[in-house]
Amino acid sequence: MLSLLTNPVLLIEGWYSWGVAIAFAITFVTTLWIFFDSQSNDYQAALWRWLSLLSAIIVIPSVILSFSPALMTGLPATLIQILAMAGIIATLISLFSLLLYGLGLGVSAPEVEPAAIPNPVAPLDDESGLARAGARPDVHPTPTPPRGVLPATKEKPVTPQRITPTGSDTIRIKNAYENELPLAWVVALNGPHAGQEYRLQKITDIGRESDHNDVALNDPTISRQHARIRYEKGAFVIYDLASANGVFINGEQVQRRVITHRDRIKLGQVMLGVLMVNEDLDEDVAMPSAPAAATLRMEG
């Protein structure tokens, strides 16, 4: 192998004898994978698409010469060497593109349409400590009255004291309000984890391995990294991470979907229910509990 790398003649001969077939397979598979994966997940990855496609095109002349050696007799030796070196460099660029695409560099996720975004939990008002119910980005909020004067509204103001959990749960809820992250959970409805609740974070990975996932489901039908739920512009969006058994929302297989309250998420043989804080702030806000999980199972 060392002599092959240090001797240009041997390198060119090895390229046209067996290296071209390997390079063509690498560039072809890389191009198909990047195009298919970015298209199915609606990713913006134009740089890696074009680099992988260009690499595959550059290797094609070497493939033609490899399968038709008679064509080499009419070409200058310098051109044959240039085509070989270009093919080797193109193969390395193709592998480099696949690696960076897999790491997510230069790849942007799709934006959630505003119409599909459910109303998140309204943030706390810094002056009065009250939550403005039903506040939406496209609606101008009512001007805040002077300190000490209650707003003129028929609705009863909602204060943080109406939140019932205590201890660490109260701290988590307070942090959620401060970070403008809605309170949402997924609850295992069957299997060995039935009844267990998992709080959704800005990025929540779901899979079989506990070391790499926030929600670890010990089930053989679950992939090592099965799905990901991300909080994007006021909505929780689930993505299928090329799992073996797919992601189903309310019986429909999806690659990407906004999830809402009481949705059913099926991963392999495991069914998860989605619990979110009620948007109607006239009702008490409470943490989900075992009876809530049982209710989800009965309704499903």
Image (spheres, helix red, strand yellow):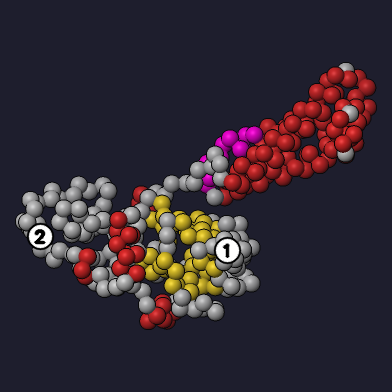
Q: Is residue 68 visible?
A: no
| Amino acid type assigned to the residue bearing label 2 in the image | Thr
Label 2 or label 1, whichever comes before in sequence order = 2
- Structural distance between the alpha carbons of marks 2 and 1: 50 Å
Residue 165: where, in percent of width, then height?
29, 73
Q: Is residue 251 left or right of residue 10?
A: left
Residue 212: where, in percent of width, then height?
57, 61
Q: Is residue 5 visible?
A: yes
Q: Quadrant of residue 34?
A: top right
Q: Quadrant of residue 59?
A: top right
Q: Is residue 44 above or below residue 13?
A: below
Residue 259: where, in percent of width, then height?
42, 61
If the image is split into quadrants, where does the N terminus sit? top right
- Residue 164 lies in magenta, yes or no? no
| Amino acid type assigned to the residue bearing label 1 in the image | Asp
Residue 153's tag is: 2
Pointer 1: what residue? 211
Q: Quadrant of residue 174?
A: bottom left
Disc 1 element? loop
Q: Is residue 234 above or below residue 65?
A: below
For the residue pair 173 and 278, the one nearer the viewer reads as: 173
Q: Is residue 255 above or below residue 1?
A: below
Q: Is residue 141 left or right of residue 83?
A: left
What residue is drawn where x is 15% and y is 56%? 128
Disc 2 element? loop
Residue 255: where, in percent of width, then height?
54, 56
For the residue pair 277 and 167, the one nearer the viewer reads as: 167
Q: Is residue 64 left or right of residue 180?
A: right
Magenta portion: prevailing SS class: helix
What residue is drawn where x is 23% and y is 57%? 124
Stretch of the chain drawn in magenta: 42-51
